[in-house]
Image (cartoon, grey):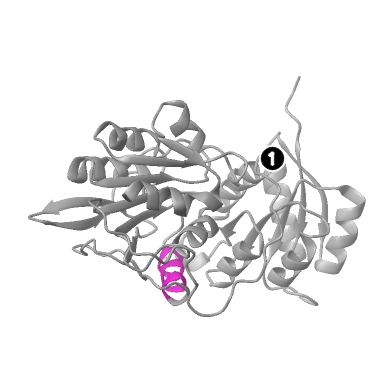
Amino acid sequence: MPPKKIRVLIVDDSALFRGVVAKGISADPNIVVVATAIDPYDAKDKIIETAPDVMICDVVMPKMDGIEFIRRLLPQYPLRVVVVSSVSEAVLDAINAGAVDFVLKPDMNSGRSASVFIAELIEKIKIAGNAHIPRPKPARPQGPARADLKTSTPSTKRIIAIGASTGGTEALFNILSAMPPDIPGVVVVQHIPPVFSRMFAERLDKALPLRVSEAQNGDFVERGRVLIAPGDKHMTVKKLGDKLRVEVNAGEKVSGHCPSVDVLFNSVAQACGADAVGVILTGMGSDGAKGLLSMRSKGARTIGQDEASSVVYGMPKVAFDIGAVDKQVPLENIPQAIISALS
C-alpha cells in the first residue's frame, strides 16, 4: 500500500511565490498541494475546506502577520506549520508560537538557489508531516526566567552536553529556564542555520539567568555558562590542564549535519569521561545516538527525551534503541533528571 500523501496548504501574499512553491513541492510524489491562500483569513477558510496536514506560512503578510496567525490558529485547528521567511528573529517568534520548523526564502545575493530552497522545503514538510501535533503555547514571560530548581548544584560533574534538532529550540528554553544559575557548564548542538544560532543564543541570554552565547574558538566551559555551536561549524570539547575549552571548526557533515551532535558527544566522552551528563532531545534522524553511547560507555550519565513530549521522536528513539540512554523522561522532567544525574 503506497504511503499516504502529505496534504499541504501554501499561504503567501505573492502569487508568483505560491506558484513556484506549489510546482516545486508537487514534484515529490509524497506531497500534494490541496490549496493556496493569499492571507490568514483566506487560509482559515481553506483549512476548513481542505483539512491539510501541513501549512507553509510566510511571516510578513497583509491583514495579519504569520506569528499572530499561528498563535490564534493552533488552539482551534491544530496542524503542523513550516514557516518560510527571510533571515529575521521573527522566525524564532514563529517557532515559539508553535511552528514546527522553518526554511529561509531564496536570496539571490547569497547564491542560494531556488532548487536548494525547494529541496529543503520538501525535507521540512516530510519532517513536519510526521511530527506530533503541537500543543498551544502560552506567551513567554518577559525578562529572566524563574528557575524551578534554584538549589545549588555541588557536583563532581564538569559538563552537560545537549543535542537537539526539530523542536529543540523550545525544548532547550524549557530545560535551561529551570536550571540553577550555578549549573555546570553546558555545551549545545542545535541543528539550526548560521546567523540563527547567534540570534538564538542572544535571545536565551536575555531571557535566562545563565550566560548564553554562540561558541567561539577558545571559549572555556564554566559554571553558569551555556555555549551553543555556530550553525555551520562543528564544536568539540578539549581538556586543557584542569580546564575544558571548546573548539569550533568548519568541516564536512557528520551524521548528516554540521554542527553534529555526534561530533560534540564523542569529544565530551574523550575529554570528560564519567564527569559528564549527556542529553538528547527531539529531532529527526540519528545524529547524537552513537556519540551518546560513547559517553555512556565512558561512565557519563545519559538522558533521552521520551516519545510523547518530542516534536519528532527520531534522535532520542535511536539513542534509546541502541542502549545509549540511562534514563528516558518527558521534557518537563528533564531538568530534574539532569540535577539528579549531577549528584
Image x and y of residue 191, in percent: 45, 52
Single out the residue that lies furthest toward the bottom.
143
- Quadrant housing the N terminus: top right
Quarter where residue 142 is shown: bottom right
User: Is residue 222 shown above or below 9?
Assistant: below
Residue 59 shows in this picture:
yes
| Left or right for 266, reference 173 | left
Q: Nearer the viewer, residue 292 or 41?
A: 292
Please provide the residue range marked out in magenta.
Answer: 196-205
Identity of the residue drawn at 33% across and 40% down? 301
Identity of the residue drawn at 24% across and 64% down? 222
Single out the residue that lies furthest toward the top.
1
The answer to whether residue 317 is magenta is: no
Image x and y of residue 324, in percent: 38, 32
Identity of the residue drawn at 55% across and 45% down? 330
Query: What amino acid type is highlighted by mark number 1?
Result: Ala
Quarter where residue 43 is shown: bottom right
Image x and y of residue 10, in percent: 76, 56
Q: Main secondary structure of the magenta part?
A: helix
Identity of the residue drawn at 48% across and 46% down? 281
Image x and y of residue 261, in percent: 37, 45
Give the residue number, with chain letter if any, for mark 1: 27
The answer to whether residue 200 is magenta is: yes
